[in-house]
Image: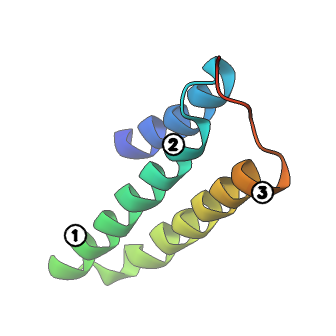
């Protein structure tokens, strides 16, 4: 559960500090993809759909920060 909290902080903090705001959501998506692989390898595929949902939401945030409402980086 701590990885999800770190992802949440990683998505929120860069937008507040304006330090690499677009990269945080992509990092969260990569973390969740690796969690899917981890669950499938261990035979715990029942948890994979929730991680897939988190990947989708992270990619949506990354898209929104890049195209819909970009957050300008700190100068």
Q: Residue at x 36, y 39 (%)?
A: 2
Pointer 2: what residue?
A: 24
Pointer 1: what residue?
A: 38
- Indicate which disc, 3 or 1, sits on the residue closer to the N terminus: 1
Pointer 3: what residue?
A: 67
Mark 3 burial class by Cα count in 10 Å: few <14, some 14-19, many 20+: few
Q: Position of residue 66 (x, y in %)?
A: 70, 52
Q: Residue at x 16, y 80 (%)?
A: 41
Q: Position of residue 67 (x, y in %)?
A: 77, 57
Quadrant showing the N terminus: top left
Question: Which residue is nearer to you in this view: 70 or 39?
Answer: 70
Quadrant showing the C terminus: top right
Marks 2, 1: nearer the viewer: 2
Identify the element where label 1 is drawn.
Answer: helix
Q: Quadrant of residue 19?
A: top right
- Indicate which disc, 2 or 1, sits on the residue closer to the N terminus: 2
Mark 2 burial class by Cα count in 10 Å: few <14, some 14-19, many 20+: many
Can you name the residue that lies furthest to the front here? 75
Mark 1 burial class by Cα count in 10 Å: few <14, some 14-19, many 20+: some
């Amino acid at each position: 559960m701590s990885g999800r909290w770190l992802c949440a902080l990683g998505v929120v903090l860069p937008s507040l500090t304006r330090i690499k705001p677009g990269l945080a959501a992509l990092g969260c998506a990569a973390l969740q993809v690796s969690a899917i692989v981890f669950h499938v390898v261990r035979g715990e595929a029942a948890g994979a759909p929730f991680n897939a949902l988190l990947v989708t939401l992270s990619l949506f945030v990354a898209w929104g920060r890049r195209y819909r409402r970009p957050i300008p980086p700190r100068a």
